[in-house]
Image (spheres, rainbow, N blue to C red):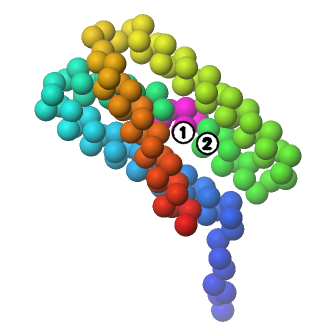
């Protein structure tokens, strides 16, 4: 006979992170598709902004999820390094986009960044509860 076991906190949190990443992806694509009405520069600028937030967040998630459930010191150490890496990678990606992507619509770039960032907060809040 199988017992109904509640998933561990680490499993629920990992699942919440995956849900948040999926929601971010969907919102970034929908935003870019909507901005195609304004033109391709607005659309790809928002995608660049979305990726600048999404890729470091994905890296952070991959690093931190592997340490969930381990001892607290190991987890906190990994989380701190992953957060520093996420911030550093976000800055580097912003610089690279502004250097290499021409033409760029800066307003739509930042709209893409903020949309994906806010979506991650909302997605996590909804997925964890």
Q: Is residue 45 left or right of residue 34?
A: right
Contact check, label 2 and label 1, Cβ < 8 Å: yes
Find the distance from the CA under tag 2 to the CA under tag 1: 6 Å
Judging by the rendered image, the residue that carries numbered circle 1 is: 58
Where's the C terminus, which quadrant? bottom right
Q: Is residue 127 left or right of residue 1?
A: left
Q: Is residue 85 above or below residue 72?
A: above
In the image, which residues are magenta?
A: 54-59
Q: Position of residue 21 (x, y in %)?
A: 47, 47
Q: Is residue 37 above or below residue 12?
A: above
- In the figure, residue 61 lies in which quadrant? top right
Could you tell me which residue is drawn at 47 percent across and 18 percent down?
94
* Residue 45 visible in the snapshot: yes
Q: Position of residue 23 (x, y in %)?
A: 40, 50
* The one of 84 and 63 positioned closer to us in this rendering: 84
Where's the N terminus, which quadrant? bottom right
Q: Residues within 10 Å of mark 1 (few under 14, many from 20)?
A: some
Under tag 2, what secondary structure?
A: helix
The chief SS type of the magenta part is helix
In this view, which residue lies farthest toward the left? 37
Judging by the rendered image, the residue that carries numbered circle 2 is: 62
Could you tell me which residue is drawn at 52 percent across and 57 percent down?
125
- In the figure, residue 51 lies in which quadrant? top left
């Amino acid at each position: 006979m199988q017992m109904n076991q509640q998933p561990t906190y680490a499993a629920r949190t990992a699942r919440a992170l995956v849900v948040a990443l999926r929601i971010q992806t969907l919102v970034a694509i929908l935003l870019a598709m909507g901005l195609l009405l304004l033109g391709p520069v607005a659309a790809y600028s928002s995608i660049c902004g979305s990726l600048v937030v999404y890729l470091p967040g994905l890296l952070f998630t991959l690093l931190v999820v592997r340490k969930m459930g381990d001892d607290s010191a190991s987890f906190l150490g990994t989380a701190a390094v992953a957060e520093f890496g996420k911030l550093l990678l976000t800055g580097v990606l912003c610089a690279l986009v502004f250097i290499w992507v021409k033409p760029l619509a800066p307003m739509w770039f930042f709209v893409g960044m903020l949309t994906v960032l806010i979506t991650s907060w909302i997605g996590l809040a909804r997925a964890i509860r």
